Every structure is written in C-alpha cells, then in structure tokens.
Image (cartoon, rainbow, N blue to C red):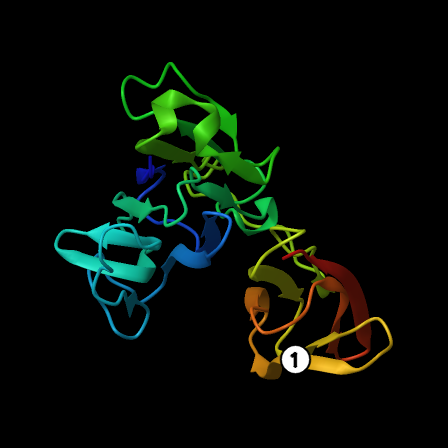
Amino acid sequence: MRHTALLVAVLCLAAAARAQQFTTPVSVTDGATTLVLYLGAAAGATNGYDPRYDTAAPPPPPAGAFDARTRLGTDDFTQDIRSVTGFAGTFELRYQSGTGNPPVLHWDPATLGGGPGAVWTITDRFDGTHAAVDMRSTTTLATGTNPFLADGLVIRVTVPLSAGGTPQEELPLATGLGQNYPNPFNPATVIPFTLAEPGAVTLRVYDEIGRLVATLVEERKEAGRHTAVWDARNVASGVYLCEMRSGGVRAVRKLTLLK
C-alpha cells in the first residue's frame, strides 16, 4: 500500500519585540527527491507575502507526488522571511512523500538564529509531551521514528534576553565553509558558508581528479551566513570536493553523492 505522509510544522518564536535577522534552510526528502525550504526574519520584511524577501511556491502537485512548502494563511512559499520587528508569527511547513517513505528533515545547527543562547526544540503538535528534539545537538529528524510526528510537529524557538532587555548579539563570524547537509545526499544538498566581511566569493564543486563539475556561487556577498544548494541529479554517484574562496581564505569540504 502506498503511504503518503503529511507533515505540518509550526515554528513559534518567543522573543523580545525585535528578533535578530536569520535565515534557516531546512531540507525535506523522501529518499528520491529533496526540496529546501527557507525560514527566517529580516529587517524590512513583513509578516506576509513580500516579493522582495519571499518566494512563492508553485501550484501543489497531484496526490502521490512529492511536495514541500511553507504556508501562511492562504499563501504557500518555498522561502518565507518575516519581519524582525514584532516577530511572533508561526511558520507552517507542509509536505507529502512521493515514494511511501516517511519524510526526513535535515538542517545545519550553525544556521539556527537567535544567538548562541537561543533554544530550538521540536515537539509533537498534540500536547508537546511525546517528542523533544534539541535542534542544536542534531542535524536530522526522521519523522517515521515517532508516530506522533507522522503528520505534524512544532518547532519552538526561545531567544534569551540580555541584561538590557534585548536579544543577545551573535558572536562575530569567521569566513569559512561548513559541512553540507544531508551528507551523503541524493539528489540535492545544502552547503553553508560564512563571510566575516563583504566581498567576492566563489563556491565550486570538483570531482576527485580535479575536474570542475559545478559553479554554485561567483559573486559579491554581504557579511553573514549564507547557503548554496547543489542539485546533482545529473551527476554520477561519488565523492566530490566543494571549494570556497573569499579574500585570502580557501576552504574545502567532501561531499558524498549516493544514488
């Protein structure tokens, strides 16, 4: 029997009147297809659809086809960025499996916003007593391991206040390249990187003998946390090298594609 899993995730942010800017990518996969959704907050964004920050999702596919999206009211997104001022909204995440495999979520703890003291916790959507996942201590959630997470969950984010009553500041970032996630992956993976200051950055993927496979980033970017997505559906299985260059910094990570 074909099994279709539908996940409804609600992200609640408990914070002061003004939240820090952040963008958190969450990849969703059913083992055959991977989609990356972006949740976040930014100065100038609104708590509704804003084409400057948000990306609208395409029309829903037919039943039995893989899908992942966030929802706000009657609008669906693949990127939903809310206002940092008065940010107390919710992100609802919906997806369905196209293979019968329960969906699996992946994220990078380095992209979880709110500063080093912020707490990100996943619980069930019933009464919050059937699941408790610290998102800073792991990178993956297989929804099929807990029946209370089969069709929904809640992500609660608590941002601590400093003595002055404002959210704690993020520690200064160093320029660097994070490990991709998921890894191993098929067919897409998220590659995080950080810039200590604005500048030109390149992100390229090579095979094991040094041949260029893909150029993911080649532009000037602002200081902060960034991500790139490599869709390798037309590339053979194997180990690849992702190289980042920015200023005088060069960093390399191994990526494992398993089909």
Using residue 56 as the reference point, say whether residue 234 is left or right of it: right
Q: Position of residue 114 (x, y in %)?
A: 48, 45
Q: Position of residue 23 (x, y in %)?
A: 45, 57
What residue is disc 1 on? Answer: 214
Using residue 144 as the reference point, say whether residue 79 is left or right of it: left
Quadrant where the image shows the C terminus: bottom right
**Quarter of the rendering containing residue 43:** bottom left
View extreme (right): residue: 209
Q: Nearer the viewer, residue 67 or 127?
A: 67
Q: Nearer the viewer, residue 20 or 144?
A: 144
- Residue drawn at x 39%, y 55% is 40
View extreme (front): residue: 1
- Residue drawn at x 30%, y 67% is 54
Q: Nearer the viewer, residue 47 or 235?
A: 235
Residue 73: tell me if it is visible: yes
Q: Amino acid at mark 1?
A: Ala
- Residue drawn at x 48%, y 52% is 27
**Quarter of the rendering containing residue 158:** top left
Q: Position of residue 69 (x, y in %)?
A: 31, 55
192 over 10 or under it: above or below: below
- Residue drawn at x 56%, y 68% is 233
210 over 26 or under it: above or below: below
Quadrant where the image shows the N terminus: top left
Residue 11: tell me if it is visible: no
Using residue 157 as the reference point, say whether residue 4 is left or right of it: left
Q: Name the secondary structure under disc 1.
A: strand
Q: Residues within 10 Å of mark 1 (few under 14, many from 20)?
A: some
